[in-house]
Image (cartoon, helix red, strand yellow):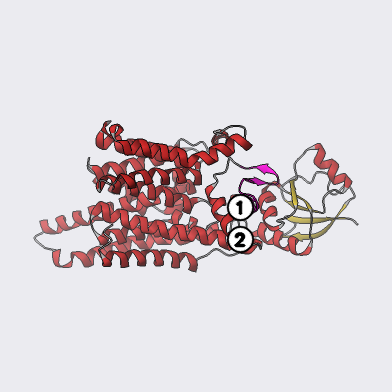
Amino acid sequence: MDRRNPKRKVLLGIVFLFALAIQLITLPPWDTLSYDGALYIDIARNLAGNPTNFTYQGVYMMYRPPLYPYTLSLFYHFFHKPLSQLIVARLVSAVFFALTAMIVYMLAVELFESEAKGLIASLFFIFNALAFTMGTRELVHSEFTFFYSLAVYLLYTGRKKDNPTRICLAFVSAGLAILTRYTGLSIIAVFVAYLWLTEYWNWVKMREYWVGFALLLLTLSPWLYLGHLHYGGALKPFEVANRAVTADRPVSVSTFLKWLFKDIGRILPALVVLGLVRQKQNEKGWLLLSWAIIGFAMIMTVTHKETRFVTFLAPVMALLAVEGVFLIADGIEKAIELLGKSVKPWKKILTVVFVILLLIPVGGSAFHLKERWNITGKYDSRVLKYASEHYPANRLLVSPYLYTMAGFYYSTARVEMIIPKKDVEEKINRGYYDVIIHKDPNTYLNIITSGKYKLVKEFYNGRFKIFIRIA
């Protein structure tokens, strides 16, 4: 971006402030919390005390990507109350969301040489249902999307401006993307495909790319070392993460696409497809095609798929949506000209109106998905918050789905799961646990028959039950 262009600087600031403001206005309520989000916060607390303590309940969780918990841990030196830490986690995501909107704007300006298209692209990113929803969740997606997009932006502009420093920094950002979410490994394939399509193998002869790959490895090296030290192998975290995802419930491509259309609607995907059709075999086209197709294909190879997994593609979806919008606009203009009319005096106004009409349903899907996510963990959070305020505990037994969220509210307690194991039943018989929180339809084991615990509170027609040890 031209730093000497004051208008562009102002527009960039407006994009950031608008993206941040809309996320702050729609910040989720306190009583919604995801299982993964609670785990990231739990880990971040431990990291605030010891930068190598990537654990929850004494177990190393290195199959989870590290950068987001490490980012949170920087703030958790100063914020100690659970709900304050939750707000911090969401604000961190909101800031990365706003920064990514800036990246989308800057990349669109570089690709299309138009501030107007940059603004439109940033709006399609901001109101992408997945990006919008993940923009205030206590999850990795906003930070991941930022570093992934920044890496692509730096690589493209580094090549365009013949700036080896930017190219090298692109690989550093790629390494940070991988450390934010392991599916970030797909960026290596995106880079190689883009370089091969634009230069065949000539790029291999250039020193900056070898330096770049060395910097990427250097960026990953501290985590690889910790994996070797605490997890039994440098690549073990990636291996365990892959095994965990593979072992989860399989989701077919057709089912995933159905879920995706439900979440983001059909207007945005249609514009993306039109944008793909518009691409030419040039630098810009190969970049967008490599990013979109390889990134999406990598997610499709995963056995267990969730729609939030493709949030990192929201920037390229926005860029392709702009191409789709102008493909339609150009088609309409040519059709009108064939009728002997001219729309040139009104073209800008008509384009603005057309973009607004398309953004309305896209934005509607964004707000709808965010409201659906605001129900996640709602009842669990209310029960656990009540329990933590009324029934303090050093040792806690909870149903499996409450495991990480219990640690969030009982930050200093030893938390175990209600699972059919002999040692758990023996501990119940001994009255080992101070408090037991049961969520149907999990098994009760011997909680009632042990005679060591009494039911003190029920929630939501008995779906949740709190037991405390009989004195």
Q: Nearer the viewer, residue 33 or 71?
A: 71
**Judging from the image, what secondary structure is the residue with disc 1 in?**
helix
Q: Residue 44's mark?
A: 1
**Judging from the image, what secondary structure is the residue with disc 2 in?**
helix
CB of mark 1 within 8 Å of CB of mark 2? Answer: yes
Which picture quadrant has residue 167?
top left
Q: Is residue 58 magenta?
A: yes
Q: Is residue 432 magenta?
A: no
> Outermost residue, left direction?
340
Q: Residues within 10 Å of mark 2 (few under 14, many from 20)?
A: many
Which residues lie in the magenta part? 38-61
Callout 1 amino acid = Ala
Identify the residue at horizontal 38%, vertical 56% (top origin).
125
Callout 2 amino acid = Gln
Identify the residue at horizontal 74%, vertical 49% (top origin).
415
State left or right for residue 117 relative to residue 370.
left
Q: Residues within 10 Å of mark 1 (few under 14, many from 20)?
A: many
Q: Is residue 33 above or below residue 223?
A: below
Identify the residue at horizontal 34%, vertical 37% (top origin).
209
Q: Residue 154's mark?
A: none
Q: Nearer the viewer, residue 96 or 402?
A: 96
Q: Position of residue 238 (x, y in %)?
A: 54, 36
The residue pinned by badge 2 equals: 85
State left or right for residue 412 relative to residue 312.
right
Q: Nearer the viewer, residue 122 or 459?
A: 122
Look at the image and tell me whether residue 411 can be seen: yes
Identify the residue at horizontal 31%, vertical 61% (top origin).
119
